Amino acid sequence: EPEVTQTPSHQVTQMGQEVILRCVPISNHLYFYWYRQILGQKVEFLVSFYNNEISEKSEIFDDQFSVERPDGSNFTLKIRSTKLEDSAMYFCASRIRFGQGVYSYEQYFGPGTRLTVT
Amino acid sequence: DQQVKQNSPSLSVQEGRISILNCDYTNSMFDYFLWYKKYPAEGPTFLISISSIKDKNEDGRFTVFLNKSAKHLSLHIVPSQPGDSAVYFCAASQLSGSARQLTFGSGTQLTVLP
């Protein structure tokens, strides 16, 4: 069964460094998302991407963040200058534009990248 | 931001019995609801969803009920199995723009005792 993959599984970086988190969404999906979960907190939406542009973003997704789909398969999240508070699990998700039913908006998540900023 | 609330952080159930997980929401614009299951060190796994035009959706052992007037949904698992032990997240989305990003609850840890 197709699945979303993410690399690396764990990334340790120093404050102020740039990190790139990578995702390979399910191949026939057209919407791509990044979420994060800080330890002990809820899963939070960061950004959605469709047709090679950002379609929605949250308040968390400030100028330090960017997303890109550099080729037909990868979807990346870049944090330009990491802060301690960026430490979290980052989940990539994807969904097909039209689901199997008329109303079908389920998103499929990858296993996550644990980002630790020291 | 408490638009989606899961008020029970944990639930223990005996194997073979019914598990009922509850979720409340405050945003009346939400029109699609999902349940995800999550094991430690894994991403959320989609379980079942329901549109606001329905009040029930069933898939095998899993049934989701939606009460729009009460802004409440529940997930029933019957019979419960030890492998169902995980954190269960309720999520909701609305048609604002086209992205349909998910708003999650805080999760309920389900433990199914053998």
Image (spheres, helix red, strand yellow):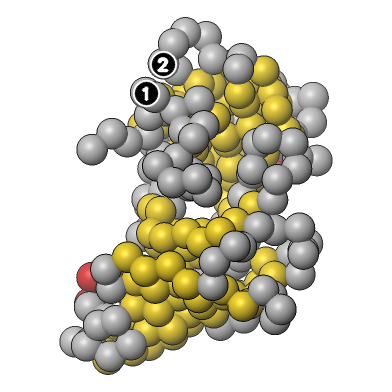
Q: Using a 10 Å C-alpha cutoff, classify the residue at mark 2 as few (fewer than 14 neighbours), some (14 to 19) or many (20 or more).
A: few
The residue positioned 51% from the left and 32% from the top of the image is: A97
Are dots 1 and 2 on a single chain? yes
Front tag of 1 and 2:
1
Compared across the picture, whether B5 is left or right of A23 comes to right
**The label number, if any, that marks residue A73 in the structure image:** 2
Q: Amino acid at mark 2?
A: Ser
**Residue placed under numbered mark 1 in the picture:** A27
Quarter of the picture containing the C terminus of chain B is bottom left
Distance from Cα at disc 1 to Cα at disc 2: 7 Å
Compared across the picture, whether A80 is left or right of A90 comes to right
Q: Using a 10 Å C-alpha cutoff, classify the residue at mark 1 as few (fewer than 14 neighbours), some (14 to 19) or many (20 or more).
A: some
Q: Are marks 1 and 2 in contact (CB under 8 Å)?
A: yes
Of residues B38 and A21, which is closer to you in this image?
B38
The residue positioned 77% from the left and 64% from the top of the image is: B28
Q: Secondary structure at mark 2?
A: loop
